[in-house]
Image (tube, rainbow, N blue to C red):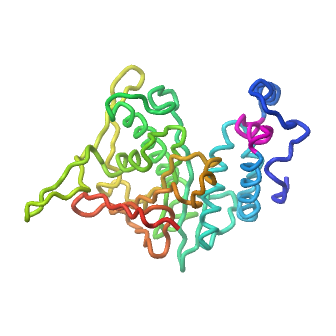
């Protein structure tokens, strides 16, 4: 398959439709394709999204890994591969020096001076945890938040393991930053960066701090270094302090987004308007935000205060 192919080329298999019944018939008769791919391909009202995705692919195709389009169309692959493609689109739009993917190593390689910044993309799914599926229900905030923190934790630790075992010191030099890009649209909290901050900075309830002059200052929070979730009928604890010490110093930061890629060009948003870059203050390879910054910058200082650069939307 040539990289010059388009994403949506199966018009003979998926003629345009406008009903759920017809869509389900397509899904049943073509299990070799991801249902999300089929939906975007065939639904008559998705033309604007199809055209937008094709325009992104046209920018990205010469940088993509071999057989990218084949994988994108496979079951359970449309979302993660379009997430990777969208990140590359943002990188290219900002004129960073994206390198071609040979199929070995993390998903994206960006040349910054004499080093690379490496990005590994992943999406979170509910897995078997029904409490992490769908939109959060009414009730105590942590009842809906903690299962989603657990899914972020699972994605982060798995990609960290793969990086250390397969990439570090071989494909990736030990002095080069490594970022994990997590899409949480399937474990949405409806609160933008809150789940990511809670997962890596141990963010609990917001609190006010009294200053020496008696005034109150916000921006502080209770520290929650673990969360409790149910697994196989038992309560287990999950770390929520990955960026509060040097245990995960190999991770320079995470990019977090709770928006599905197919909605990224809606409502007049900027290309990276719903991305958050959370930096690890204990990382051995720090990210210089003046040289590389995607989305809204979030950092934590030595007082455990979270600082959000919400004006930094390019």
In the rendered view, would you say 26 is above or below 65?
A: above
Point 72% across, 55% down: residue: 52
The percent coordinates of residue 102 (x first, y second) are: 70, 61
Please tell me whether residue 48 is drawn above or below residue 94 in the rendered image.
Answer: above
Identify the residue at image location x=46%, y=32%: 132
> Residue lying furthest bottom in this view?
113
Residue 301, relative to residue 79: is it above or below? below
In-image side of 292 versus 299 (left or right) = right
Residue 279, by quadrant, is bottom left
Q: Position of residue 119 (x, y in %)?
A: 55, 59
**Residue at image location 69% in from the left, 66% down from the top:** 100
Write down the quadrant of residue 123 in the picture: top right
What residue occupies the far front of the structure in this picture?
Answer: 267
Where's residue 109, x and y in %?
Answer: 60, 65
Residue 39 percent coordinates (x, y) = 74, 37
Q: Which residues are magenta?
A: 33-46
Instruction: Give yes or no for residue 24 being in the magenta stretch.
Output: no
Q: Residue furthest top?
A: 233
Query: Looking at the magenta stretch, what is its main secondary structure?
Result: helix
Q: Is residue 33 left or right of residue 250?
A: right
37 falls in the magenta region: yes
Of the pair 3 and 172, the residue shown nearer to us: 3
Q: Residue at x 42, y 22 (%)?
A: 232
Q: Report the front residue among 64 and 58.
A: 58
């Amino acid at each position: 398959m040539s990289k010059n192919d388009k994403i949506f080329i199966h018009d003979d298999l998926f003629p345009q439709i406008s009903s759920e019944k017809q869509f389900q018939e397509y899904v049943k008769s073509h299990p070799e394709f991801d249902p999300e791919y089929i939906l975007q391909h065939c639904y008559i009202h998705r033309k604007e999204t199809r055209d937008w995705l094709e325009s992104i692919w046209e920018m990205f195709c010469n940088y993509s890994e071999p057989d990218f389009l084949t994988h994108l169309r496979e079951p359970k692959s449309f979302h993660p591969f379009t997430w990777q493609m969208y990140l590359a689109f943002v990188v290219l739009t900002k004129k960073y020096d994206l390198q071609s993917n040979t199929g070995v190593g993390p998903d994206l390689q960006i040349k910054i001076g004499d080093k690379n910044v490496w990005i590994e993309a992943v999406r979170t799914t509910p897995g078997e945890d029904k409490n992490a599926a769908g939109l959060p229900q009414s009730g105590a905030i942590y009842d809906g938040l903690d299962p989603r923190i657990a899914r972020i934790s699972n994605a982060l630790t798995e990609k960290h393991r793969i990086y250390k075992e397969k990439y570090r010191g071989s494909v990736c030099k030990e002095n080069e930053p490594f970022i994990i890009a997590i899409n949480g649209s399937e474990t949405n909290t409806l609160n933008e960066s809150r789940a990511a901050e809670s997962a890596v900075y141990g963010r609990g309830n917001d609190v006010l701090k009294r200053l020496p002059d008696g005034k109150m200052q916000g921006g502080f929070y209770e520290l929650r270094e673990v969360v409790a979730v149910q697994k196989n009928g038992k309560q287990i604890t999950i770390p929520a302090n990955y960026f509060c010490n040097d245990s995960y110093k190999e991770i320079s930061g995470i990019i977090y987004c709770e928006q599905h890629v197919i909605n990224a060009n809606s409502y007049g948003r900027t290309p990276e308007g719903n991305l958050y870059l959370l930096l690890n203050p204990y990382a051995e390879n720090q990210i210089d935000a003046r040289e590389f910054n995607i989305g809204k910058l979030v950092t934590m200082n030595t007082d455990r205060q979270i600082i959000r650069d919400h004006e930094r939307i390019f």
